[in-house]
Amino acid sequence: MHVMWMSVTETMNSCGGKLTDVCPKVKCKYRSCGKKKDYYEVTSRENQALNSIFQQKWRWFYELEIGDPSRNVIEKIFRAASTNPSTQHRTIKKVLRVNNTVDISEKFEKYRGAVKRRSFGQHPRSTVDGNELLQFYVTTMTCCYGKRKIISDLCKDPSCCVCKLIQTGFRNSCNSENGIQLSTSSDAPCEHASRVSNTKNVKRAVIVCRTIAGRVVNKDDMKLDQEYDSVASGLHSRSQYLIVKDSDAVLPCFIIVLN
C-alpha cells in the first residue's frame, strides 16, 4: 500500500500549488538602483488584491474521473486497507483530490520539521521524515448530491462533515479535546455515520490523509513523563488507530465518497 501511495505522490501534486499557478500573469515590480534591479515586497493593498484573486479562483476539490490513473491507485489503496471482506467491493461514487492551500501545506511541513528536531536522533523514522504515515479518517458528506454533479468548492451545509473538516483544518471541539483519531483501516467504524446513515443525501466518506505520527506510544503502555507526538491503539488487531494531538500533523489529500 505504501508503494502505491508513493506512486501517486510522484505523479501528481496533492498538496496544493503556488500563487503563480493560479495567477500566472501577475508579475512582481522592481525599482532600479543604478544597473542593478532590486525586487521589493508588494504593498498591503497589492497583497489584498492578490489574495482576493487567489480566493476567487481557488478550488478546494478536483474530481478524478473513472479511468484516471491516480483514481485507480487511490481505489486500490482504499480496498487494500479494508479489514472487512464484505466492504471491499463497495461502490465508489466519487474520488476527489483535495487542493490544499500553500499555507496549509507549509504548516504541515513546518510541523514535520519540528518533529524531526524533537527526535534528537533517537527515533530513526522521525528523524528522516517525521514518521509520515498514510491514514484514513472516516466521516460523512452531504454535498455529493443534488445539482452539484462536479464538486469543486466547500459547501455551506453545517451537516457536511467533510467540508467542515477541510475548512477548519480538522479543528473542532471533539478533536481539540480528544485529538484527531485516524485509522489504518479504510472501513473503520464512524459513530457519526451510524447516526445519520438513514438520512437522505448523507453518504459515508473516507478522507485519505498524510499524517506526521512522530514519536508514537502505545495507549496501554503510556507513562506520565513520556514524551510523544501521537498515541496508537489496537496494535494487535487488524484495525489500528492513531490519535494525533496537533491538527497541523494531518494533511488531507483525497476524499472517497461511497454509495
Image (spheres, rainbow, N blue to C red):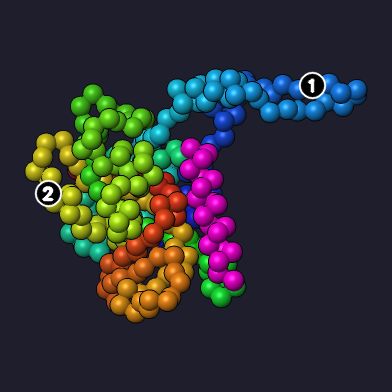
For the C terminus, the image quarter is top left
**Identity, as a three-letter code, of the amino acid under mark 1:** Arg
Q: Which residue is mark 1?
A: 31
User: In which quarter of the view is residue 221 placed?
Assistant: bottom left
In-image side of 44 versus 30 (left or right): left
- Is disc 1 placed on a helix, strand or loop? strand
Q: Residue at x 60, y 29 (%)?
A: 20
**CB under 8 Å between discs 2 and 1:** no
Q: Which residues are magenta?
A: 101-120
Placement of 200 over or under 246, stated as above or below: above
Q: Residue at x 53, y 62 (%)?
A: 115
Q: Residue at x 28, y 67 (%)?
A: 239
Neighbourhood count class around disc 1 (C-alpha, 10 Å): few under 14, some 14–19, many 20 upward = few
Specify the principal SS of the magenta part: helix
* Visible residue check, residue 78: no
Distance from Cα at disc 2 to Cα at disc 1: 61 Å
- Please, which residue is most extreme toward the front here? 225
| Percent coordinates x, y for residue 233 in the rendering | 30, 70
- Is residue 116 within the magenta segment? yes
Placement of 13 over or under 210, stated as above or below: above
In-image side of 37 versus 191 (left or right): right
| Percent coordinates x, y for residue 165 in the rendering | 32, 43
| Percent coordinates x, y for residue 103 in the rendering | 51, 40
In-image side of 37 versus 198 (left or right): right
Nearer to us in this view, 225 or 118: 225
| Percent coordinates x, y for residue 171 in the rendering | 35, 47
Q: Which residue is mark 2?
A: 195
**Identity, as a three-letter code, of the amino acid under mark 2:** Arg
Q: Residue at x 38, y 60 (%)?
A: 244
Neighbourhood count class around disc 2 (C-alpha, 10 Å): few under 14, some 14–19, many 20 upward = few
- Please, which residue is most extreme toward the left here? 198
- Is residue 20 within the magenta segment? no
